[in-house]
Image: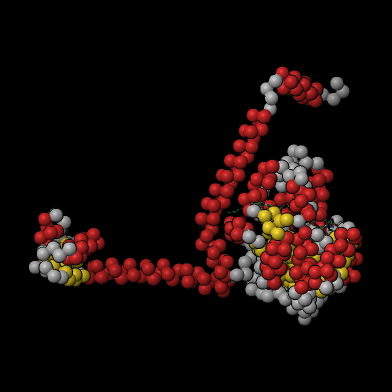
């Protein structure tokens, strides 16, 4: 008995189900349930025991097309991986640390000190630079105690180009320069003094220019010494602007522009640039910072948790050694780095693949974070408003404020 039906999978399934249920005649079953219709794509034959399906040429073409699209679906990621492997620039590189000169600014405390200790343990000749001679001595002693290794110390302020140049010349050619010094005075811009803004931009950004201008000539001359590195200690606040960090974020975003452009300029000298992006990190600097940090800054920064200085140093050193341009330090940092990949160089074709594929969904995650942060800001302002007393004092204050504004707007000489 032959019947022609249309292709639907449901019908085929039904017939198989009926076979399994041992329905004597599938045809009768389908006819009774009104499910048989005429078409020329599939011919099926049913008997009480078995169903045989014969496909017409049109259905074969359909299946071939489906198979081809499945193949393409698999081939697309594979060919993308292959293409990325060929095009990622700069090319992958390994930067050795052992027996090389590692120079760390801000190496007397926190992340810089942890990095100095790690680099020394890995067999590097380490120099550290900071302002306070006393802190430098304490750092030198603590590294000696922990590892038995002597590091060289240089007292200079990165804002003073001549002092920095003198220190660098004394220290000798550098293989790995870690520009790590940084200051952070968080405050809403309206309340922050311009001097504090200038302080952060001068130390974090201009100080980094001074360091590079001082060290680069000698770094370029180290012929036959293998690949060298210039690494900048940025911050996750250098990937996304955070409440209370207007000046700090600006100084760290500035480092990114500096690093991207510099990498193109020094690639010919076999010098490789890294940008490290830590979250809040337990250091003497953070301890000071939290004493005056606006509550909202702490709430938003908590989205990424906190790390220990040594954990950050470990990630940083690994990133430098593998020549990564972008170096995230924790999981949130990894997401943030993918979300903000932009046009930054990427040496790893695997990371490039992840960036291409995850871009859309991570943008969505980023928007969710912003939704959450703006929610906190709104809530905080609502609470603050509720706390303001609606007393007569408030009215008097408002009148005085209006009078003040009136006087200020009067022409000069009044
Ligand atoms: N701790 C954190 O939460 C995070 C920190 N970072 C970044 O990591 C870096 C290190 O931070 P952290 O370890 O916490 O900081 P610390 O305050 O603990 O240490 C800062 C170091 O920089 C030195 N330094 C400061 N100003 C100057 C200057 N003008 N010239 C030369 N050296 C200077 C300090 O020594 P001295 O005072 O004697 O000069 C000290 O050695 C900074 O760039 C910071 O922005 C990034 C993300 C998070
Ligand atoms: C797409 C998904 C996004 C994932 C999460 C993003 C979380 C961002 C949090 C930013 C925290 C900034 C801390 C700055 C710390 C710092 O530099 C100061 N302590 C000064 O030293």
- Residue occupying the far front of the picture: 145
Quadrant of residue 226 within the rendered picture: bottom right
Is residue 282 among what the camera can see? yes
- Residue 410 horizontal side relative to residue 40, left or right: right
Quadrant of residue 270 within the rendered picture: bottom right
* 10 lies above or below 101: above
Is residue 219 among what the camera can see? no
Question: Residue drawn 80% across and 22% down?
Answer: 407
Whole-percent x, y for residue 212 in the image: 80, 64
Locate the N terminus by quadrant.
bottom left
Q: Tell which quarter ligand 1 is in.
A: bottom right
Question: Residue drawn 83% across and 73% down?
Answer: 148
Quadrant of residue 319 within the rendered picture: bottom right
Question: Residue drawn 58% across and 46% down?
Answer: 370
Whole-percent x, y for residue 200 in the image: 79, 50
- Residue 28 horizontal side relative to residue 384, left or right: left
Whole-percent x, y for residue 247 in the image: 75, 47
Question: Residue drawn 84% across and 63% down?
Answer: 139
- Residue 378 horizontal side relative to residue 104, left or right: left
Number of marks in picture: 0
Pick the front one: 7 or 191: 191
Whole-percent x, y for residue 155 in the image: 89, 62
- Residue occupying the far bottom of the picture: 224
* 407 lies above or below 130: above
Locate the C terminus by quadrant.
top right
- Residue 324 horizontal side relative to residue 215, left or right: left
- Residue occupying the far left of the picture: 1
């Amino acid at each position: 008995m032959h019947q022609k039906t249309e292709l639907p999978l449901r019908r085929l399934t039904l017939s198989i189900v009926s076979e399994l249920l041992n329905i004597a005649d599938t045809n009768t079953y389908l006819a009774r349930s009104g499910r048989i219709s005429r078409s020329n794509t599939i011919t099926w034959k049913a008997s009480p025991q078995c169903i045989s399906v014969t496909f017409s040429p049109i259905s074969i073409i359909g299946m071939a097309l489906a198979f081809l699209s499945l193949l393409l679906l698999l081939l697309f990621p594979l060919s993308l991986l292959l293409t990325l492997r060929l095009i990622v620039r700069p090319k992958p590189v390994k930067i050795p640390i052992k027996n090389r000169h590692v120079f760390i600014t801000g190496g007397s405390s926190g992340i810089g000190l942890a990095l100095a200790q790690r680099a020394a343990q890995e067999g590097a000749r380490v120099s550290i630079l900071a302002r306070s001679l006393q802190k430098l001595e304490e750092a030198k002693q603590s590294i000696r105690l922990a590892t038995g290794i002597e590091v060289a110390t240089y007292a200079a302020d990165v804002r003073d180009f001549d002092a920095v140049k003198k220190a660098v010349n004394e220290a000798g050619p550098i293989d790995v320069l870690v520009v790590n010094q940084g200051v952070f005075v968080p405050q809403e811009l309206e309340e922050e003094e311009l001097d504090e803004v200038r302080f952060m931009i001068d130390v974090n950004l201009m100080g980094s220019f001074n360091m590079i201008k001082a060290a680069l000539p000698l770094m370029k001359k180290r012929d036959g010494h293998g690949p060298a590195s210039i690494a900048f200690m940025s911050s996750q606040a250098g990937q996304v602007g955070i409440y209370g960090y207007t000046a700090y974020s600006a100084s760290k975003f500035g480092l990114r522009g500096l690093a991207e452009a510099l990498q193109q300029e020094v690639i010919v000298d076999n010098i490789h640039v890294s940008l490290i992006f830590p979250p809040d990190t337990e250091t003497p600097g953070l301890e000071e910072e939290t004493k005056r940090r606006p509550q909202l800054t702490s709430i938003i920064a908590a989205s990424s948790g906190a790390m220990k200085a040594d954990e950050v140093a470990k990630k940083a050193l690994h990133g430098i050694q593998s020549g990564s341009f972008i170096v995230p330090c924790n999981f949130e940092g990894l997401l943030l780095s993918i979300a903000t990949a932009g046009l930054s160089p990427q040496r790893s074709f695997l990371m490039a693949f992840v960036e291409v594929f995850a871009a859309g969904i991570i943008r969505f995650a980023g928007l969710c974070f912003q939704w959450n942060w703006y929610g906190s800001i709104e809530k905080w302002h609502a609470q603050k408003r509720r706390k303001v007393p609606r007393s007569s004092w408030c009215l008097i204050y408002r009148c005085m404020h209006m009078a003040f504004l009136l006087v200020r707007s009067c022409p000069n000489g009044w």
